[in-house]
Image (spheres, helix red, strand yellow):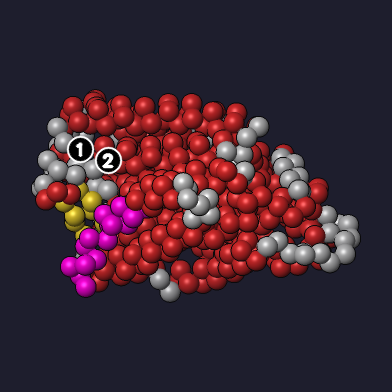
Amino acid sequence: MEAVIEHFPVLAVAISLLSSFTILVTSIYTKRAGYPISLAVTFIQLVMAVLILIGVLTDGTINYWLGGWRPPWGIEYRVDVLGAYVLVIVALFSFFSTVYAKRVVEEEIESSKHPYFYTLWMLLVSGMVGVAVTGDLFNLFVFLEISSLATYALIAMAGRKALIASFNYLVLGAVGISFYLLGTAFLYAATGTLNMYDARVLVSLLYSSKIVQLSFVFYFIGLAMKMALFPFHIWQPNAYEYSPSAVTVIISTALAKINAYALFRIIYSVYTIKFFQNYGIILDATAFVASVGIIAGSLFAIMEKSLKKMLAYSSVANVGYIVLALTLGKWGVYAAASHLLNHSLMKAALFMVAGGFIYRLGARNIDDLEGLGRAMPLSSAAFAMAAVSMIGIPPSAGFVTKLFILLASLDTGRFVFIAVMIASSLLSLVYFWRVIEILYMKGHRERMDEIPASMLYPALLMGILSISAGILWFFNVDMLQQIALALEVK
């Protein structure tokens, strides 16, 4: 079985690339093949991802050399505990986003465009899976761009205002990936290699090199734009607001986390924590930017009237959580790694329900939700569970992330971040409680049909997991410890 699993990383990428081509070809004969093919492939990828994670936890890191070419000359797919864990996250939310997409796509996208939608959808999945498994810096760029180009087109498919949102995302995404390429060029000039783990050895001898230092700055700025870290977030609210609801779900969960994972990998697998210990100013500047982003994102969310835009600004704050955590040592790694899953669970439920309200009622603004708590109790319950977790009420998934960041702040003696987390929790209480109040305590509506089952059940599952995952993390800290160990963070 071990010999079979070692081929799964490349197969997981290959089947979704092949499926995108298959969907396009089959559209000549039928326009309906896109959804079942996408659903089947994302399910197979989820099974593969789970088996890869089990294999890595049992037998150690998977190293796959494409074409048999030994690194650093050839491209290497390298899946350690962190990569396998992120691959499961990508596969999980790609699958449930695909389940959710059926009714939304039928409603929001012209039937003649359905084959193109699912072709792009599978290209997006291919890019995200590739980012999770690659151990090559240029290959990482290729997969980031595959996922980004597919996303631009998917957002634009909603037409009208989505075209402008997609164009703004494209421009900033192009700038971001240019910075990433500059970082890669500078690092290659200094080390002569593109393999992450070969570069790691060579960079450790070149910490004083201005070229190496500048390469990290370029990497950080480029990936900050990709992940919508404040103040590089300006593309995100409109992209989330105007894109098809299924696209909002997948880019707010899987795509957002794969971009964060890329920064995670650059920091710990290429430059290593010793680089930042030598240059504390970089660490302090990163933590400062993240802290400002946490507060600013929360304040922008409070001011928003649109539900999807409010959730988008909340995501800006939560990206700040991940980046801040990356600067806080071992407990910070625990926080960042757990939040990759925690935030995806919460945002999946929230955006699934928000998309359902638009589908059923055309309700985009928060004030349009009056009385829906009793009129659509299951849909509203899914939203409320995820909202409670976002606030950080024990023992939810959101609480675990904030607890780990608090412990990391105490462990590193950086007590100012405790104040940042408390302020963020209070601000999130303000804007999420406003929605809960409108759902359950204002207005009255007669019972009405819930959102469609293919949209409701995934949302309910994610809402339940948003609460229960917090408890499960306390019984699964061992995996977080293995991630920290793999990254050599003590």
Q: What's the magenta bit mostly, secondary-structure-wise? A: helix
Q: Which type of secondary structure does the marked residue at label 2 adopt?
A: helix
Q: Quadrant of the C terminus?
A: bottom left
Residue 111 appears at what percent x and percent y?
A: 60, 46
Residue under label 1, please give it. Answer: 194
Mark 1 surroundings within 10 Å by alpha-carbon count, few (fewer than 14), some (14 through 19), many (20 or more): many
Residue under label 2, please give it. Answer: 139
Indicate whether 144 appears above or below 221: below
Precedes in sequence: disc 2 or disc 1:
2
Q: Is residue 11 magenta?
A: yes
Extent of the magenta region: 1-16
Q: How many marks?
A: 2
> What residue is drawn where x is 38% and y is 40%?
146
Whether the residues at callouts 2 and 1 have beta carbons within 8 Å, the answer is: yes
Q: Depth check: 52 or 314 in front?
A: 52
Residue 35 visible in the shown view: yes
Could you say which disc has been placed on residue 348 in the image?
none
Residue 442 appears at what percent x and percent y?
A: 86, 57
Residue 328 appears at what percent x and percent y?
A: 40, 49
Single out the mark in the foreground, 2 or 1. 2
> What residue is drawn where x is 62% and y is 35%?
159
Q: Which type of secondary structure does the marked residue at label 1 adopt?
A: loop
The image quarter in which residue 439 lies:
bottom right
Amino acid type indicated by mark 2 = Asn
Extreme-front residue of the structure: 29
Residue 229 appears at what percent x and percent y?
A: 49, 38
Amino acid type indicated by mark 1 = Leu
